[in-house]
Image: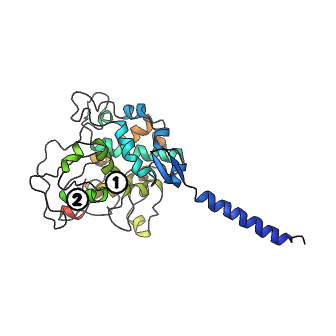
């Protein structure tokens, strides 16, 4: 007996729903760079960001006067990113969003490791990845902490692509990545892949529960609450500074630290062919008026430091 039209329609709808679910749940692998994830079905970072572009972004890093000459390289960045591309780093959304996120992350890296100054050859933004370690630390950044006590003889000055400070932060990052950074903080100035990896972990990881990571705040995964809106926190590059540095950079009006990071991000967008006009409205780009997610407390071991 022939099936009725409603029955045929029902079967058609079920098949189409199954197809939608299958497409939604599709998992891809793109070589060693991105494995077993829906994000890997998009382009990988090396598809749209290649060695020559890395060289364009950081042209002075191997200058004889650069303090980390010979240390940072493209392969170390891509190798480190392979741990996070399957989680969405540089693989979220379409190509434009993917390029925007890579530029944003590297904008932080370049701004935090630059040894450029106002009259520097090639401009301030040309000198990113000049440092791998804080050159003249004023202290050892050792604060009493029962979870992560300072190792004898170790100092916890700033190291890495987005510098890590303080024993607590070395301990937290080390535990997360399975590296004994508490006892060997110097590893971050000896291994460029590890130095990029710690920076990417910070980019992808919220400081506290119910707060966004820098990644989520940038790519649109984070939806601000009413309280966030009242405190002028909105998604975008500005929010990434808020997540990573709090009131060391944000909620302080117009300031040099914030402007340096923004200028690196915009410069990199231009060099990558995206264009700074794609960075979005000014209020998304800066954090001058944003209230920090995590205001500074007395003990530096209580939150992630820059």
Please provide percent x and percent y for residue 287.
35, 54
Quadrant the N terminus occupies:
bottom right
- Judged from the image, the secondary structure of the residue bearing numbered disc 2 is helix
> Which label number is shown at residue 171?
2
The colour style of the image is: rainbow
* In the foreground, 68 or 265: 68
Give the spatial CA distance, label 2 vs label 1. Answer: 13 Å
- Which residue occupies 36% across, 68% down? 209
The residue that appears at 39% across and 31% down in the rendered structure is 56
> In the shown orientation, is residue 112 left or right of residue 46?
left
Q: In which quarter of the image is residue 225?
A: bottom left
Quarter-wise, where is residue 145 in the image?
Answer: bottom left
Is disc 1 placed on a helix, strand or loop?
helix
Query: Residue 85's spot in the image, x, y percent?
Result: 44, 50
Task: Determine the residue positioned at 37% across, 37% down.
Answer: 74
Comparing 101 with 188, the one in front is 188
């Amino acid at each position: 007996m022939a099936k009725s039209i409603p029955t045929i329609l029902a079967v058609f709808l079920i098949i189409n729903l199954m197809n939608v679910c299958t497409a939604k749940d599709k998992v891809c692998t793109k070589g060693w760079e991105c494995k077993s994830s829906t994000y890997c079905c998009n382009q990988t970072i090396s598809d749209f960001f290649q060695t020559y572009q890395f060289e364009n972004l950081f042209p002075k890093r191997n200058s004889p006067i650069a303090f980390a000459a010979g240390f940072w390289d493209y392969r170390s960045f891509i190798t480190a990113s392979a741990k996070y591309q399957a989680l969405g780093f540089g693989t979220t959304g379409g190509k434009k969003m993917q390029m925007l996120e890579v530029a944003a992350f590297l904008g932080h890296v370049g701004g935090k490791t630059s040894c450029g100054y106002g009259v520097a050859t090639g401009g301030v933004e040309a000198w990113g990845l000049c440092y791998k370690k804080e050159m003249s630390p004023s202290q050892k950044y050792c604060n009493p902490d029962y979870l992560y006590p300072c190792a004898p003889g170790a100092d916890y000055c700033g190291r890495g692509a987005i510098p890590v400070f303080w024993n607590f932060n070395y301990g937290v990052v080390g535990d997360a990545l399975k590296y004994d950074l508490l006892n060997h903080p110097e590893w971050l100035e000896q291994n460029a892949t590890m130095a990029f990896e710690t920076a990417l972990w910070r980019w992808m990881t919220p400081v506290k529960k119910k707060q966004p990571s820098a990644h989520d705040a940038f790519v649109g995964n984070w939806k601000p609450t009413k309280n966030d809106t009242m405190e002028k926190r909105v998604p975008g590059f500005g929010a990434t500074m808020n997540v990573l540095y709090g009131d060391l950079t944000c909620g302080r009006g117009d300031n040099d630290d914030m402007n340096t990071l923004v200028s690196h991000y915009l410069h990199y967008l231009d060099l990558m062919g995206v264009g700074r006009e794609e960075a979005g409205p000014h209020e998304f780009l800066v954090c001058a008026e944003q209230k920090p997610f995590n205001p500074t407390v007395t003990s530096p071991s209580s939150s992630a430091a820059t």
